[in-house]
């Protein structure tokens, strides 16, 4: 996970503000930063979405492909998750090289010697090599956990021929920028991308030599996924004696323990995970669970409103695209 280095004075300042329900950016302890959601941003996917939460930028693409059902679930399709942190590393390196180049030019223009040049450090070392792979695996495993139940998505809808053919949804998550609270932003982006996903309708034709599968050519003749019960993750970070939602990188540096709570639109808790090296007492856990349910319901409601509004705009909505 990306991190920042804070002095003890900065940590004390942040912790005292949290105790008074006043964070550095002016939010209360249960307030999210502004979330920007845009769907249908990648043309060669079945569904896609981009989510910006503060300085955290996530791109998710969903690709529907035919596969074979799993042996233990012959009447269902399934989802596969892949999380790529390399884009974040490449973007950080590019931005750092650009900034360093500009700084060096300005220093040279003022006549400073070469000793005043700024040396380039490795961009985002937490995401290099095994660090990025471990983070990607951790996020993917968390997504598998929250989708590993029958209530999240109707996987039987993805079955074409029992034991023979089914739809496999490959969900690719791309981290473009990390500004804290990765899990929440990724879960929102995954739900938005699944809402945007359109799967072609299939007809199974009985032939003498066997069965043939015919895909519909009509882009409007498709299957839509019901995301009503798809959960979102609410991360609650313990800072001092209180907890906050949607922590920034600076606030994450002040927190020794966090609780990841998977919540549905009805406020049902489906999964929970503790992260960080610190400990949480039972009373704090129950308080954080109640806060997560309350905040999660509001998050789902706001997200669904935005998704419905964008859907109703249709082709009149101006697309920005993930590079916009």
Image (spheres, helix red, strand yellow):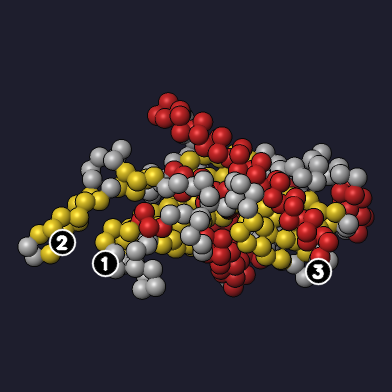
In the image, 278: left or right of 169?
A: right
Q: Which mark is residue 211?
A: 2
Residue identified by numbered label 3: 278
Q: Which of 151 and 116 is in front in this view?
A: 151
Instruction: Tell whether label 1 touches label 3 (CB within 8 Å).
Output: no
* Percent x, y of residue 26: 82, 39
Say which of 143 and 179 sits in front: 143
Q: Earlier in the sequence, mark 3 or mark 1?
A: 1
Label 3 to label 1: alpha-carbon separation: 48 Å
In terms of secondary structure, where does tag 1 sit? Answer: loop
Q: Which marked residue is nearer to the observer: mark 3 or mark 2?
A: 2
- The picture places residue 48, in percent across and down from the top left corner, at 45, 46
Q: Residue at x 86, y 49 (%)?
A: 18
How crowded pointer 1 is (Cα within 10 Å; few <14, some 14-19, many 20+) is rated as some
Residue depicted at 71% across the width and 51% down the height: 292
- Identify residue for label 1: 164
| Dot 3 alpha-carbon crowd within 10 angstroms: few under 14, some 14 to 19, many 20 or more | few
Query: Would residue 157 be visible to someone looking at this image?
Result: yes
Residue positioned 69% across, 50% down in the render: 293
């Amino acid at each position: 996970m990306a991190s920042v280095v804070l002095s003890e004075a900065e940590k004390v300042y942040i912790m005292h503000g949290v105790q008074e329900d006043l964070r550095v950016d002016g939010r209360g302890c249960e307030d999210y930063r502004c979330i920007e959601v845009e769907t249908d941003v990648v043309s060669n996917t079945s569904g896609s979405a981009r989510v910006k939460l503060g300085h955290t930028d996530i791109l998710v693409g969903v690709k529907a492909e035919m596969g074979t059902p799993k042996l233990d679930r012959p009447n269902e399709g399934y989802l596969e998750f892949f999380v790529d942190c390399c884009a974040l590393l490449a973007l950080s390196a590019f931005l750092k090289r650009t900034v360093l180049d500009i700084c060096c030019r300005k220093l040279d223009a003022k006549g400073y010697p070469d000793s005043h040049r700024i040396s380039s450090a490795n961009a985002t070392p937490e995401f290099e090599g095994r660090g990025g792979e471990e983070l990607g695996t951790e996020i993917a495993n968390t997504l598998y956990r929250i989708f590993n139940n029958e209530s999240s998505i109707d996987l039987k809808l993805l079955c074409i021929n029992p034991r023979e053919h089914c739809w496999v949804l490959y969900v690719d998550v791309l981290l473009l920028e990390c500004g804290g609270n990765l899990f929440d932003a990724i879960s929102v982006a995954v739900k938005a991308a699944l809402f945007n996903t359109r799967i072609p309708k299939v007809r199974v034709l009985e032939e003498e030599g066997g069965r043939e599968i015919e895909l519909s050519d009509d882009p409007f003749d498709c299957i839509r996924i019901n995301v009503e019960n798809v959960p979102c993750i609410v991360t609650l970070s313990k800072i001092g004696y209180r907890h906050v939602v949607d922590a920034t990188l600076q606030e994450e540096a002040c927190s020794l323990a966090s609780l990841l709570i998977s919540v549905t639109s009805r406020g049902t808790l489906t999964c929970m995970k503790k992260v960080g090296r610190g400990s949480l007492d039972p009373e704090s856990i129950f308080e954080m669970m109640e806060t997560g349910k309350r905040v999660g319901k509001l998050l789902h409601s706001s997200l669904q409103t935005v998704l419905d509004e964008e859907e109703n705009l249709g082709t009149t909505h101006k697309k920005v695209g993930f590079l916009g």
